[in-house]
Amino acid sequence: MCCCIPPIPIASEDQLHEKPKITYILLAAETSVLLFNNILTALNGLEIVPGNLNEWIFQHLGYIPNERYPWTFFTYSLLHDGWFHLLGNLLFLWIFGSFLEQRLGPRRYLFLIILGSVFSCVGHDLAINTLGTGQTITIPLVGASGFISAILGAFVVLLPTAKFRCFYFILFDWGIVKLPAIVYIPIFVFWGDLFALAYHGADTAVAHGAHLGGAFWGILFGIFIRYTPKTQKAVDREVQKQDEEGQALARLAHENFRQALDMKATDAALSLIREGEKLGRPLPLTLADRVRLAMLLEENGETFLAAQTYRSLMAGDLNHDQRLEIGLRLAKILLVYERNLEATKTLLRTLYKEYQTDPRLPEIQKLVDQVKETERNLFKRPR
Protein backbone atom coordinates (compact mmCIF):
# COMPACT_ATOMS: atom_id res chain seq x y z
CA MET A 1 0.00 0.00 0.00
CA CYS A 2 1.41 3.43 -0.92
CA CYS A 3 0.65 6.73 0.72
CA CYS A 4 2.13 10.14 1.31
CA ILE A 5 2.35 12.71 4.07
CA PRO A 6 3.30 16.40 3.87
CA PRO A 7 6.86 17.25 4.91
CA ILE A 8 7.32 17.45 8.69
CA PRO A 9 9.90 19.96 10.01
CA ILE A 10 12.42 18.27 12.28
CA ALA A 11 15.28 20.78 12.63
CA SER A 12 16.44 24.26 11.65
CA GLU A 13 19.52 25.04 9.59
CA ASP A 14 20.27 28.00 11.89
CA GLN A 15 21.61 28.16 15.44
CA LEU A 16 19.91 29.74 18.44
CA HIS A 17 21.98 32.45 20.12
CA GLU A 18 19.63 33.16 23.02
CA LYS A 19 17.51 30.98 25.30
CA PRO A 20 13.85 31.24 24.20
CA LYS A 21 12.44 31.58 27.74
CA ILE A 22 8.81 32.17 26.78
CA THR A 23 8.89 29.15 24.46
CA TYR A 24 10.37 27.02 27.24
CA ILE A 25 7.58 28.13 29.60
CA LEU A 26 4.90 27.34 27.01
CA LEU A 27 6.36 23.90 26.29
CA ALA A 28 6.37 23.09 30.01
CA ALA A 29 2.88 24.51 30.62
CA GLU A 30 1.25 22.66 27.70
CA THR A 31 2.85 19.37 28.74
CA SER A 32 2.00 19.82 32.43
CA VAL A 33 -1.69 20.48 31.74
CA LEU A 34 -2.11 17.33 29.65
CA LEU A 35 -0.16 15.30 32.21
CA PHE A 36 -2.47 16.65 34.92
CA ASN A 37 -5.51 15.63 32.86
CA ASN A 38 -4.09 12.13 32.41
CA ILE A 39 -3.51 11.86 36.16
CA LEU A 40 -7.14 12.83 36.75
CA THR A 41 -8.22 10.13 34.31
CA ALA A 42 -6.11 7.55 36.15
CA LEU A 43 -7.49 8.65 39.53
CA ASN A 44 -10.98 8.43 38.11
CA GLY A 45 -10.26 4.82 37.14
CA LEU A 46 -9.36 4.18 40.76
CA GLU A 47 -12.57 5.98 41.80
CA ILE A 48 -10.57 8.59 43.73
CA VAL A 49 -11.91 11.61 41.82
CA PRO A 50 -15.30 12.14 40.14
CA GLY A 51 -15.58 10.74 36.65
CA ASN A 52 -16.81 13.97 35.09
CA LEU A 53 -13.97 16.21 36.36
CA ASN A 54 -12.01 16.12 33.08
CA GLU A 55 -15.19 16.79 31.14
CA TRP A 56 -15.89 19.77 33.42
CA ILE A 57 -12.40 21.16 32.71
CA PHE A 58 -12.90 20.95 28.94
CA GLN A 59 -16.40 22.45 29.14
CA HIS A 60 -15.32 25.41 31.30
CA LEU A 61 -11.78 26.07 30.00
CA GLY A 62 -12.20 25.10 26.35
CA TYR A 63 -13.60 27.73 23.97
CA ILE A 64 -17.26 26.97 23.12
CA PRO A 65 -18.60 29.16 20.28
CA ASN A 66 -22.15 29.53 21.60
CA GLU A 67 -20.98 30.51 25.11
CA ARG A 68 -17.77 32.55 24.66
CA TYR A 69 -16.71 32.86 28.28
CA PRO A 70 -14.01 35.61 28.31
CA TRP A 71 -11.31 33.51 29.97
CA THR A 72 -11.72 30.69 27.46
CA PHE A 73 -10.27 32.91 24.70
CA PHE A 74 -6.93 32.10 26.35
CA THR A 75 -7.33 28.95 28.46
CA TYR A 76 -8.39 26.73 25.55
CA SER A 77 -4.87 26.90 24.13
CA LEU A 78 -3.50 25.04 27.18
CA LEU A 79 -5.77 22.02 26.70
CA HIS A 80 -5.17 19.06 24.37
CA ASP A 81 -7.21 15.94 23.75
CA GLY A 82 -4.25 13.54 23.54
CA TRP A 83 -0.50 13.14 23.31
CA PHE A 84 -0.37 13.07 19.50
CA HIS A 85 -2.29 16.34 19.42
CA LEU A 86 0.10 17.87 21.95
CA LEU A 87 3.36 16.56 20.46
CA GLY A 88 2.50 17.85 16.99
CA ASN A 89 1.89 21.32 18.39
CA LEU A 90 5.01 21.24 20.57
CA LEU A 91 7.14 20.30 17.56
CA PHE A 92 6.03 23.38 15.62
CA LEU A 93 6.19 25.58 18.73
CA TRP A 94 9.79 24.59 19.41
CA ILE A 95 11.13 24.68 15.84
CA PHE A 96 9.47 27.93 14.77
CA GLY A 97 8.65 29.64 18.07
CA SER A 98 12.15 29.55 19.52
CA PHE A 99 13.68 31.37 16.53
CA LEU A 100 10.82 33.86 16.31
CA GLU A 101 11.20 34.69 20.02
CA GLN A 102 14.89 35.35 19.40
CA ARG A 103 13.94 37.67 16.52
CA LEU A 104 11.17 39.55 18.37
CA GLY A 105 12.25 39.49 22.00
CA PRO A 106 10.08 38.05 24.81
CA ARG A 107 7.59 40.94 25.13
CA ARG A 108 6.58 41.25 21.50
CA TYR A 109 6.59 37.46 21.16
CA LEU A 110 4.21 37.10 24.12
CA PHE A 111 1.96 39.83 22.72
CA LEU A 112 1.81 37.96 19.40
CA ILE A 113 0.83 34.74 21.18
CA ILE A 114 -1.85 36.26 23.43
CA LEU A 115 -3.66 37.99 20.58
CA GLY A 116 -3.04 34.94 18.40
CA SER A 117 -5.23 32.93 20.77
CA VAL A 118 -8.00 35.53 20.48
CA PHE A 119 -7.85 35.81 16.68
CA SER A 120 -7.90 32.03 16.48
CA CYS A 121 -11.25 31.98 18.31
CA VAL A 122 -12.59 34.67 15.98
CA GLY A 123 -11.49 32.66 12.95
CA HIS A 124 -13.15 29.55 14.40
CA ASP A 125 -16.41 31.44 14.93
CA LEU A 126 -16.39 32.84 11.40
CA ALA A 127 -15.74 29.41 9.91
CA ILE A 128 -18.51 27.56 11.75
CA ASN A 129 -21.01 30.39 11.17
CA THR A 130 -20.33 30.61 7.43
CA LEU A 131 -19.21 27.11 6.42
CA GLY A 132 -20.64 24.92 9.19
CA THR A 133 -24.01 23.33 9.85
CA GLY A 134 -24.09 24.10 13.57
CA GLN A 135 -22.89 20.66 14.65
CA THR A 136 -19.71 22.00 16.30
CA ILE A 137 -21.15 25.10 17.97
CA THR A 138 -21.30 23.37 21.37
CA ILE A 139 -18.02 21.45 21.06
CA PRO A 140 -15.07 22.95 23.00
CA LEU A 141 -12.17 24.24 20.91
CA VAL A 142 -8.86 23.11 22.46
CA GLY A 143 -5.19 23.15 21.48
CA ALA A 144 -2.26 25.50 21.00
CA SER A 145 -2.39 25.37 17.21
CA GLY A 146 -4.23 28.71 17.05
CA PHE A 147 -1.42 30.80 18.49
CA ILE A 148 1.14 28.53 16.81
CA SER A 149 -0.47 29.51 13.49
CA ALA A 150 0.07 33.13 14.54
CA ILE A 151 3.74 32.29 15.12
CA LEU A 152 3.94 30.74 11.65
CA GLY A 153 2.26 33.76 10.07
CA ALA A 154 4.72 36.17 11.67
CA PHE A 155 7.62 33.83 10.90
CA VAL A 156 6.96 33.73 7.16
CA VAL A 157 7.02 37.56 7.06
CA LEU A 158 9.97 38.19 9.38
CA LEU A 159 12.21 35.19 8.62
CA PRO A 160 11.15 34.05 5.13
CA THR A 161 14.54 32.66 4.07
CA ALA A 162 15.16 30.58 7.22
CA LYS A 163 15.62 26.95 6.13
CA PHE A 164 14.41 23.78 7.84
CA ARG A 165 15.15 20.11 7.41
CA CYS A 166 11.87 18.32 6.76
CA PHE A 167 11.06 14.61 6.70
CA TYR A 168 8.95 13.54 3.71
CA PHE A 169 7.25 10.29 2.72
CA ILE A 170 5.86 10.04 -0.82
CA LEU A 171 4.73 6.73 -2.28
CA PHE A 172 7.67 4.36 -1.69
CA ASP A 173 10.25 7.08 -1.16
CA TRP A 174 11.21 8.98 1.99
CA GLY A 175 14.04 11.15 3.20
CA ILE A 176 15.04 14.65 4.28
CA VAL A 177 14.56 17.82 2.23
CA LYS A 178 15.58 21.40 3.05
CA LEU A 179 12.82 23.97 2.60
CA PRO A 180 12.74 27.73 3.32
CA ALA A 181 9.95 29.09 5.50
CA ILE A 182 8.51 31.09 2.59
CA VAL A 183 7.87 27.80 0.76
CA TYR A 184 7.01 25.42 3.59
CA ILE A 185 4.59 27.50 5.67
CA PRO A 186 2.25 28.84 2.93
CA ILE A 187 2.14 25.64 0.86
CA PHE A 188 2.12 22.85 3.41
CA VAL A 189 0.42 24.61 6.34
CA PHE A 190 -1.85 27.49 5.32
CA TRP A 191 -2.86 26.08 1.94
CA GLY A 192 -3.78 22.79 3.64
CA ASP A 193 -6.13 24.63 6.01
CA LEU A 194 -7.71 26.63 3.18
CA PHE A 195 -8.26 23.53 1.06
CA ALA A 196 -9.69 21.51 3.96
CA LEU A 197 -12.04 24.31 4.96
CA ALA A 198 -13.25 24.85 1.39
CA TYR A 199 -13.66 21.13 0.67
CA HIS A 200 -14.92 19.74 4.00
CA GLY A 201 -16.42 22.82 5.63
CA ALA A 202 -16.13 23.67 9.32
CA ASP A 203 -17.77 20.53 10.77
CA THR A 204 -14.53 18.57 11.16
CA ALA A 205 -12.37 17.39 14.04
CA VAL A 206 -9.66 19.90 13.05
CA ALA A 207 -10.45 23.60 13.55
CA HIS A 208 -9.04 24.91 10.27
CA GLY A 209 -10.80 28.24 10.75
CA ALA A 210 -8.97 28.73 14.06
CA HIS A 211 -5.65 28.07 12.32
CA LEU A 212 -6.39 30.64 9.63
CA GLY A 213 -7.57 33.21 12.17
CA GLY A 214 -4.30 32.89 14.07
CA ALA A 215 -2.30 32.99 10.84
CA PHE A 216 -4.08 36.17 9.73
CA TRP A 217 -3.09 37.95 12.94
CA GLY A 218 0.48 36.65 12.74
CA ILE A 219 0.93 37.94 9.18
CA LEU A 220 -0.46 41.38 10.12
CA PHE A 221 1.81 41.54 13.17
CA GLY A 222 4.84 40.48 11.12
CA ILE A 223 4.17 43.12 8.47
CA PHE A 224 3.87 45.81 11.15
CA ILE A 225 7.13 44.78 12.82
CA ARG A 226 9.06 44.40 9.56
CA TYR A 227 8.04 47.66 7.94
CA THR A 228 8.06 49.92 11.00
CA PRO A 229 11.60 51.34 11.42
CA LYS A 230 13.08 52.48 14.72
CA THR A 231 11.82 55.88 15.78
CA GLN A 232 13.14 58.61 18.01
CA LYS A 233 11.20 56.95 20.85
CA ALA A 234 13.44 53.91 20.50
CA VAL A 235 16.47 56.17 20.86
CA ASP A 236 14.95 57.79 23.95
CA ARG A 237 14.33 54.40 25.57
CA GLU A 238 18.00 53.48 25.17
CA VAL A 239 19.08 56.82 26.60
CA GLN A 240 16.82 56.36 29.64
CA LYS A 241 18.71 53.22 30.60
CA GLN A 242 21.70 55.35 31.52
CA ASP A 243 22.07 57.45 34.67
CA GLU A 244 20.97 61.09 34.75
CA GLU A 245 24.41 62.45 34.03
CA GLY A 246 24.91 59.92 31.26
CA GLN A 247 21.57 60.91 29.70
CA ALA A 248 22.67 64.50 29.23
CA LEU A 249 26.02 63.43 27.78
CA ALA A 250 24.38 60.90 25.47
CA ARG A 251 21.90 63.42 24.10
CA LEU A 252 24.64 65.98 23.55
CA ALA A 253 26.82 63.41 21.78
CA HIS A 254 23.90 62.32 19.61
CA GLU A 255 23.16 65.93 18.65
CA ASN A 256 26.85 66.50 17.82
CA PHE A 257 26.81 63.33 15.74
CA ARG A 258 23.88 64.56 13.65
CA GLN A 259 25.53 67.95 13.20
CA ALA A 260 28.66 66.16 11.97
CA LEU A 261 26.54 64.28 9.42
CA ASP A 262 24.91 67.54 8.30
CA MET A 263 28.40 68.93 7.66
CA LYS A 264 29.45 65.66 5.97
CA ALA A 265 32.26 65.40 8.54
CA THR A 266 32.48 61.62 8.69
CA ASP A 267 35.73 61.68 10.68
CA ALA A 268 34.04 63.64 13.47
CA ALA A 269 30.99 61.36 13.40
CA LEU A 270 33.15 58.23 13.67
CA SER A 271 35.17 59.83 16.45
CA LEU A 272 31.99 60.41 18.48
CA ILE A 273 30.97 56.76 17.99
CA ARG A 274 34.37 55.46 19.11
CA GLU A 275 34.46 57.81 22.10
CA GLY A 276 31.03 56.63 23.24
CA GLU A 277 32.10 52.98 22.98
CA LYS A 278 35.31 53.71 24.89
CA LEU A 279 33.35 55.37 27.74
CA GLY A 280 30.80 52.57 27.86
CA ARG A 281 28.05 54.90 26.60
CA PRO A 282 27.43 53.90 22.97
CA LEU A 283 25.56 56.45 20.89
CA PRO A 284 21.85 55.54 20.59
CA LEU A 285 21.77 55.71 16.79
CA THR A 286 18.59 55.23 14.80
CA LEU A 287 18.53 53.13 11.66
CA ALA A 288 18.36 56.35 9.63
CA ASP A 289 21.52 57.65 11.36
CA ARG A 290 23.49 54.52 10.46
CA VAL A 291 22.28 54.47 6.85
CA ARG A 292 23.15 58.15 6.43
CA LEU A 293 26.62 57.63 7.90
CA ALA A 294 27.32 54.70 5.56
CA MET A 295 26.24 56.65 2.49
CA LEU A 296 28.38 59.64 3.48
CA LEU A 297 31.39 57.37 3.97
CA GLU A 298 30.85 55.97 0.49
CA GLU A 299 30.39 59.45 -0.97
CA ASN A 300 33.65 60.62 0.65
CA GLY A 301 35.56 57.69 -0.82
CA GLU A 302 35.96 55.82 2.48
CA THR A 303 34.70 52.63 0.87
CA PHE A 304 36.23 50.21 3.37
CA LEU A 305 34.42 51.82 6.32
CA ALA A 306 31.26 52.20 4.21
CA ALA A 307 31.32 48.48 3.40
CA GLN A 308 31.75 47.62 7.09
CA THR A 309 28.73 49.76 7.98
CA TYR A 310 26.64 48.32 5.14
CA ARG A 311 27.46 44.78 6.31
CA SER A 312 26.33 45.67 9.82
CA LEU A 313 23.09 47.12 8.45
CA MET A 314 22.42 44.04 6.28
CA ALA A 315 22.62 41.87 9.40
CA GLY A 316 20.12 44.08 11.22
CA ASP A 317 16.45 44.98 11.05
CA LEU A 318 15.89 46.56 7.61
CA ASN A 319 12.62 46.76 5.75
CA HIS A 320 12.20 45.38 2.22
CA ASP A 321 13.27 48.49 0.29
CA GLN A 322 16.07 49.45 2.67
CA ARG A 323 17.61 45.99 2.45
CA LEU A 324 17.67 46.16 -1.35
CA GLU A 325 19.22 49.66 -1.44
CA ILE A 326 21.91 48.76 1.11
CA GLY A 327 22.58 45.43 -0.61
CA LEU A 328 23.10 47.10 -4.00
CA ARG A 329 25.46 49.69 -2.54
CA LEU A 330 27.49 47.02 -0.75
CA ALA A 331 27.67 44.89 -3.90
CA LYS A 332 29.04 47.85 -5.91
CA ILE A 333 31.79 48.46 -3.34
CA LEU A 334 32.72 44.78 -3.20
CA LEU A 335 32.93 44.63 -6.99
CA VAL A 336 34.50 47.97 -7.92
CA TYR A 337 36.74 48.81 -4.97
CA GLU A 338 37.48 45.59 -3.09
CA ARG A 339 37.46 43.42 -6.25
CA ASN A 340 36.01 40.61 -4.15
CA LEU A 341 34.14 38.65 -6.81
CA GLU A 342 33.13 35.74 -4.60
CA ALA A 343 31.60 37.97 -1.93
CA THR A 344 29.86 40.02 -4.64
CA LYS A 345 28.38 36.91 -6.27
CA THR A 346 27.16 35.54 -2.94
CA LEU A 347 25.43 38.82 -2.09
CA LEU A 348 23.89 39.25 -5.55
CA ARG A 349 22.67 35.65 -5.51
CA THR A 350 20.84 36.34 -2.25
CA LEU A 351 19.35 39.61 -3.53
CA TYR A 352 18.29 37.99 -6.80
CA LYS A 353 16.34 35.28 -4.95
CA GLU A 354 14.66 37.73 -2.58
CA TYR A 355 13.71 40.40 -5.13
CA GLN A 356 12.69 38.46 -8.25
CA THR A 357 9.41 40.39 -8.51
CA ASP A 358 10.81 43.78 -7.46
CA PRO A 359 10.82 46.67 -9.99
CA ARG A 360 14.53 47.20 -9.24
CA LEU A 361 15.49 43.69 -10.33
CA PRO A 362 17.21 45.10 -13.48
CA GLU A 363 19.68 46.90 -11.19
CA ILE A 364 20.63 43.57 -9.64
CA GLN A 365 20.90 42.00 -13.09
CA LYS A 366 23.14 44.84 -14.25
CA LEU A 367 25.57 44.15 -11.40
CA VAL A 368 25.45 40.43 -12.19
CA ASP A 369 26.42 41.25 -15.78
CA GLN A 370 29.29 43.43 -14.54
CA VAL A 371 30.56 40.53 -12.43
CA LYS A 372 30.47 38.24 -15.48
CA GLU A 373 32.30 40.84 -17.58
CA THR A 374 34.95 41.26 -14.87
CA GLU A 375 35.48 37.50 -14.72
CA ARG A 376 35.87 37.30 -18.50
CA ASN A 377 38.43 40.12 -18.48
CA LEU A 378 40.49 38.30 -15.86
CA PHE A 379 41.12 35.44 -18.27
CA LYS A 380 41.64 37.44 -21.47
CA ARG A 381 45.05 37.03 -23.05
CA PRO A 382 46.90 40.29 -23.65
CA ARG A 383 47.38 41.05 -27.38
Image (cartoon, grey):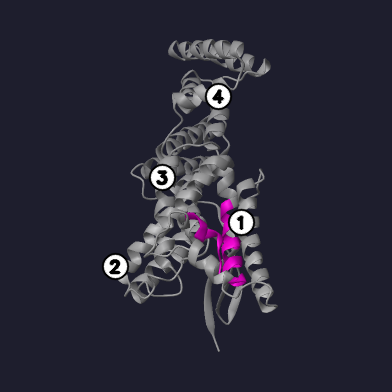
Residue occupying the point 62% across, 67% down: 37
Q: In the rendered image, which quarter is residue 283 located in?
A: top right
What residue lies at 68% left-to-right and 16% top-to-bottom? 278
Label 3 to label 2: alpha-carbon separation? 28 Å
Sequence-wise, the earlier of marks 1 and 3 is 1
The alpha-carbon separation of the residues under discs 1 and 3 comes to 22 Å
| Magenta stretch in the rendered image | 74-97
Q: Label 3 belongs to which residue? A: 223
- Sequence-wise, which precedes: disc 1 or disc 4? 1
The reply to whether the C-beta atoms of the residues labelled 2 and 1 are less than 8 Å apart is no
Secondary structure, mark 2, is helix
Q: Amino acid at mark 1?
A: Trp
Evaluate if marks 1 and 4 touch, with contact meaning CB atoms under 8 Å apart.
no
Q: Nearer the viewer, residue 140 or 308?
A: 140
The mark closer to the camera, 4 or 3, is 4
- Direction from residue 173 to residue 72 in the image, left or right: left
Q: Amino acid at mark 2?
A: Thr
Numbered disc 4: secondary structure: helix
Q: Nearer the viewer, mark 2 or mark 4?
A: 2
Real-space CA distance between mark 4 and mark 3, rounded to the nearest whole angstrom? 24 Å
Contact between marks 2 and 4 (CB within 8 A): the answer is no
On whether residue 96 falls in the magenta region, the answer is yes
- Rounded to the nearest angstrom, the CA distance separating label 1 from label 4 is 31 Å
Q: Amino acid at mark 4?
A: Glu
- Is 172 rendered above or below residue 69? below
Name the N-terminal-most of marks 2 and 4: 2
Badge 3 amino acid: Ile
**Rendered image: mark on residue 94:** 1
